[in-house]
Image (spheres, rainbow, N blue to C red):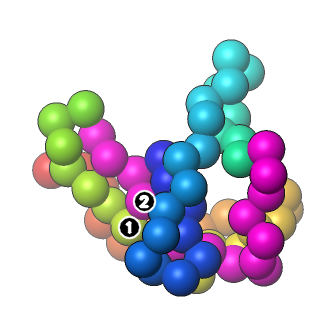
């Protein structure tokens, strides 16, 4: 999983052993784009995801 605040540069989020994805330096924005790549190379990007613990966003598509 990767996070971008400008849609051009991406920070890799490390998966923890308790099944969370974290970026220790933070994102530095209130919302960001999230890019998830499957093991087979399929990519899903979800834009304008709030960077708040109590918010969630459902992707419009899933892997094929």
In the rendered view, tell whether residue 11 sits above or below residue 40: below
Q: Which residues are magenta?
A: 24-38
Residue 35 - label: 2
In the rendered view, tell whether residue 39 sits above or below residue 52: above
Marks 2 and 1, how far apart at CA:
4 Å
The image shows residue 11 at horizontal and vertical percentages of 56, 55
Q: Would you call the spot at circle 2 few (<14 residues within 10 Å), some (14-19), or many (20 or more)?
A: some
In-front residue for pair 41/63: 41
The image shows residue 12 at horizontal and vertical percentages of 54, 47
Q: Is residue 58 visible?
A: no
Q: Quadrant of residue 49?
A: bottom right
For this orientation, the residue located farthest to the top is: 17
Residue on which disc 1 sits? 45
The answer to whether the residues at label 2 and label 1 have Cβ atoms under 8 Å apart is yes
As drawn, is 53 to the left or to the right of 12? right
Q: Residue at x 54, y 69 (%)?
A: 4
């Amino acid at each position: 999983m990767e996070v971008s605040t400008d849609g051009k540069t991406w920070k890799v989020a490390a998966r923890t052993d308790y099944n969370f994805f974290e970026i220790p330096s933070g994102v530095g924005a209130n919302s960001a784009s999230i890019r998830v790549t499957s093991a087979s190379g399929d990519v899903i990007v979800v834009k304008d995801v709030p960077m708040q613990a109590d918010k969630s966003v459902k992707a419009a598509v899933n892997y094929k």
